[in-house]
Amino acid sequence: QVQLVESGGGLVQAGGSLRLSCAASGRTFSSYVMGWFRQAPGKERELVAASGWSASNTYYADSVKGRCTISRDNAKNTVYLQMNRLKPGDTAVYYCAAKSDSSFTIRTIDYDYWGQGTQVTVSS
């Protein structure tokens, strides 16, 4: 069983920055595929960024490319999402997710474990 705990959400003005953190339990964190998803009211959950065990396995949604960076500290079992130049359209609940199988994927259905979510609100 993997437990995920997100932190770092909040209220920020448009153009500002936030860094989300997700602390994971589990002894083999370095092999997990980690993803950051978001869900806005009335919309489907969407993948924002994902990171595999290999640095070459990284994905960003088109809507955040150039503004967000996913990174991980395997020694701390933590994955981060640095978000810059935030827009009101980034307002959503952000979820951290883990896939214990190391095969890289961007499909929501393939992620096995989910955090409770952290609210990000960007004011105009």
Image (cartoon, rainbow, N blue to C red):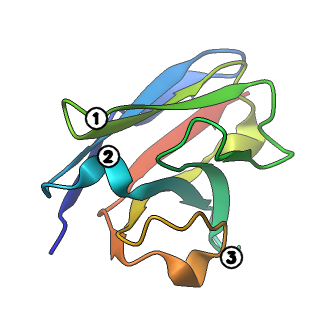
Sequence order check, earlier mark of 2 and 1: 2
Instruction: Please tell me whether mark 3 sits on a helix, a strand or a loop.
Output: loop
Residue 93, image x, y percentages: 49, 56
* Residue type pointed to by label 1: Asn
Residue 34, image x, y percentages: 45, 54
Sequence order check, earlier mark of 2 and 3: 2
Where residue 26 sits, quadrant-wise, is: bottom left
Where residue 4 sits, quadrant-wise, is: bottom left
Instruction: Please tell me whether mark 1 sits on a helix, a strand or a loop.
Output: loop
The mark found on residue 44 in the picture is 3
Q: Mark 2 points at which residue?
A: 30
Separation of disc 1 and disc 3 at Cα? 30 Å
Q: Is 42 above or below relative to 104? A: below
Q: In which quadrant will I find the N terminus? A: bottom left
Q: Is 62 above or below relative to 88? A: below
Q: Are marks 2 and 1 in contact (CB under 8 Å)?
A: yes
Residue 42, image x, y percentages: 68, 76
- Say whether residue 46 is left or right of residue 92: right
* Residue type pointed to by label 3: Glu
Residue 78, image x, y percentages: 28, 37
For label 2, the crowd category at 10 Å Cα-Cα, with few meaning under 14, some 14 to 19 and many 20 or more, is many
Q: Do the residues labelled 2 and 3 touch (CB within 8 Å)?
A: no
Front position among marks 2 and 3 = 2
- Say whether residue 29 is left or right of residue 45: left
Q: Mark 1 points at which residue?
A: 74
Say which residue appears at 74% left-offset and 25% top-offset: 67
Q: In which quadrant will I find the C terminus? A: top right
Separation of disc 2 and disc 3 at Cα? 28 Å
For label 1, the crowd category at 10 Å Cα-Cα, with few meaning under 14, some 14 to 19 and many 20 or more, is some
Instruction: Please tell me whether mark 2 sits on a helix, a strand or a loop.
Output: helix
* Residue type pointed to by label 2: Ser
